[in-house]
Amino acid sequence: MHIQHDVSLKSYNTFGIDVKARDFISFGSSDALEEIVDSFPAIHKDRRLVLGGGSNILLSGDFDGYVLKNDIGGIDVVEEDDEMVKVKAGAGVSWHELVLFAVNKGWGGIENMSLIPGSCGAAPMQNIGAYGVELKDVFDSLEAYHIQDKSRVVFSHKDCSFGYRESVFKHQYKDQFVITSMTLRLLKIPIFHTEYGAIRQELERMQIPDLTVKAISDAVIRIRSSKLPDPAKTGNAGSFFKNPSVSEETHQRLKDEYPHLVSFVNSDGTYKLAAGWLIEQCGWKGYRKGDAGCYPLQALVLVNYGTASGAEILQLSEEIQSSVIQKFGVKLEREVNLI
């Protein structure tokens, strides 16, 4: 166990924001995490930030506290039968690595979420999702360490209270637990989800004769690669805002005023609006001020072209929120966590 001081976090967040952590410690197992907590009692009451892939955060300044880098690895099959397989992944495993592991086995359930950046530990916190599929659809359980109580806890699907990009770890248990592993239930006989037009169109372009898990994964990778910037080249955290939901009445009002409004009906009768479309209509797509900007191919993605600060990205996001409220009367909520 080695603690470092005044460590740059530029390479630990996909926005590439160059700020420093006062104290930085990495761990590769639950036992190592427990040892860290025992060795540094101040962790209990001081500021702390658990980092996985750093793909869903915006660092607004230097972090005056402990940064714990989760590097717990490993992908293992823990249970299976003729129809289903349970796969357990360490929290530090790259999400896309887990997707490729499942795809190569022909196991279905997460292929629509190919190429989502970040780690497996962050996936349940955010209830990640893409192209009609969410983590909660395949989630079985997770293991987490409670820093204050020094206890290891297993969370079931119900315990996590999943919602749209939501879980108990973002609210009720915020900053209390460190997720150490996650287990998913995948299908040996996949159920394909190709309802989203972009996937169907891409599969047609690929001229796929027989639908497979790999074909869908490849299609999603091609779509995402064509629309979204590579964090290794252009700093970003993927979708910066959530798609807002509005009442049927509000949806009808907007539809009457804006016939080309992009929306989808929810199971509860409300309507989900495409945040990217709203932002684009306000003229932000391709906007750039200094090194902070709005990606030219997808307005939902804010980018750091080089040396933008977290404060500059945050200011841009607030200006976008204000303009959407002014034009549509709809409030956009950040999907990215502000630190």
Image: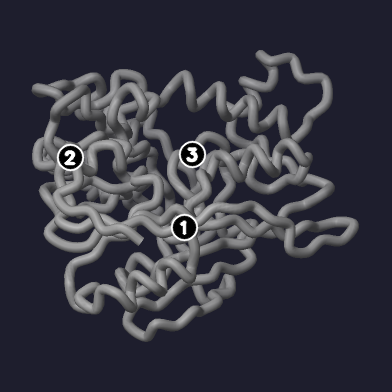
Structural distance between the alpha carbons of marks 3 and 1: 22 Å
Mark 3, Cα crowd under 10 Å, few <14 / some 14-19 / many 20+, is many
The residue positioned 73% from the left and 36% from the top of the image is 104
The number of numbered discs placed on residues in the rendered structure image is 3
Quadrant for the C terminus in the image:
bottom left
Q: Residue lying at the far right in this picture: please name it.
A: 82
Under mark 2, the amino acid is: Ser
In this rendering, would 312 be left or right of 299? left
Structural distance between the alpha carbons of marks 3 and 2: 21 Å
Residue that numbered label 2 is attached to: 317
In this rendering, would 207 be left or right of 24? right
Residue 11's image quarter? top left
Determine which of the numbered discs, if any, sits on residue 116 in the image: 3
Residue 247 image offset from top left, x and y in percent: 37, 56
Determine which of the numbered discs, if any, sits on residue 44 in the image: none
Residue 219 image offset from top left, x and y in percent: 62, 25
The residue lying toward the viewer, choosing from 252 and 261, is 261
Q: Which of disc 2 and disc 3 is earlier in sequence?
A: 3
The residue positioned 53% from the left and 24% from the top of the image is 223
Of discs 2 and 1, which sits in the foreground? 1
Residue 27 image offset from top left, x and y in percent: 41, 59
Residue that numbered label 1 is attached to: 28
Q: Is residue 170 above or below residue 118?
A: below
For mark 2, give the secondary structure.
helix
For mark 3, give the secondary structure.
loop
Quadrant for the N terminus in the image:
bottom left
State yes or no: discs 3 and 2 in contact (Cβ < 8 Å): no
